[in-house]
Image: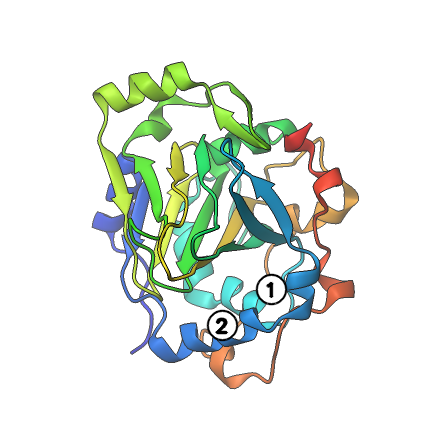
Amino acid sequence: MAKQLLTHAQIQQYNKDGYLIVRGFYDQEEVSRLYHIAIDDASISKHAINVNDSTGKRSKLSLWYKPGDDVYGLLTRGNTLVGAVDQLLERQPGDEGHSVCHYHSKLMQKEPRVGGAWEWHQDYGYWYKNEFLYPEQMMSVMIAVTDANVENGCLQVIKGSHKMGRVEHGFSGEQVGASQRYVDLALKTMEHVFVELNAGDALFFHSNILHRSEANVSDRPRWSLISCYNRSTNVGHNESSSSAASITPIEIVPDEALLTWDTAGLTESEADFLSKEADVSLK
């Protein structure tokens, strides 16, 4: 069945809650191909960054800037996905036509029993340090590569917290987390939601929504692909030259490219991976 753009009701829900779940955005064949390539991807393994939580548990992520003709890039650049992002990102006056850009993508790997927690944070709490000025022009899309539930550390959000604007962030373990005072205030007045997803579901979420996840205490892995998007009009003034993609409109591909194009994992020289030392949000 062909993928569909978002309805008016879905757009309204995203603007109200700060997130939107679209069930079955990718079918079993599509997500299976993604998973089986990812688990054997040597470039992903080589460039994985280990990040400890405040208890010492460890999660792995691999982050890259340039979306290519690999399986991840074809997903990220898919016509309907980019079209849905275009529906949700704020436009500046005079910004006409296609201006959705790929900021970066990351494969999150929470392994059974050892995958650590992520502290409460806003993505713009990090991206603010990259000196992007317009949080309404930035968002993330999480694709569940495996099922995500409470037991294996699914994402949690505070519904509507994107309307608070950016809050201060500081270090918690090796991670950058939001001010606990503001998190506590938000939890007193807003709904705390565990976002359980089935493999293939898509979660669209605002750059300022507060979110976190617990450690994976189950016997099953929790893998997800998160692609972050930006408008070409939103320049990161403290960005390295490697992130030119963040202001370059995406070269869109047909949805069916994910299954019909001859592709594999990431090409190391083209993907432009982030190293832990180069991450300005950790400084």
Residue nearest the viewer, comparing 95 with 102: 102
In the image shown, does 157 or 96 lie closer to the viewer? 157
The location of residue 35, given as percent across then percent down, is: 48, 71
Amino acid beneath label 2: Leu
Q: At numbered mark 1, what does the secondary structure look like: helix, strand or loop?
A: loop
- Between 31 and 249, the one lying in front of the other is 31
Residue found at x 69% / y 56%: 47
Q: Crowding near pointer 1: few (<14 within 10 Å), some, many (20+)?
A: some
Mark nearer the viewer, 2 or 1: 2
Front-lying residue, 169 or 160: 169
Residue found at x 55% / y 70%: 39
| Mark 2 element type | helix
- Residue type pointed to by label 1: Glu
Q: Which residue position holds label 2?
A: 34
Q: Is residue 101 visible?
A: no
Residue 218 versus residue 156 in the image, above or below: below
Alpha carbon separation for disc pair 2 and 1: 20 Å
Instruction: Give the image location of residue 225, x and y in percent.
Output: 49, 58
Taking 117 as reference, is 252 above or below it? below
Q: Quadrant of the C terminus?
A: top right
Q: Earlier in the sequence, mark 2 or mark 1?
A: 2
- Give the number of the disc on residue 251: 1
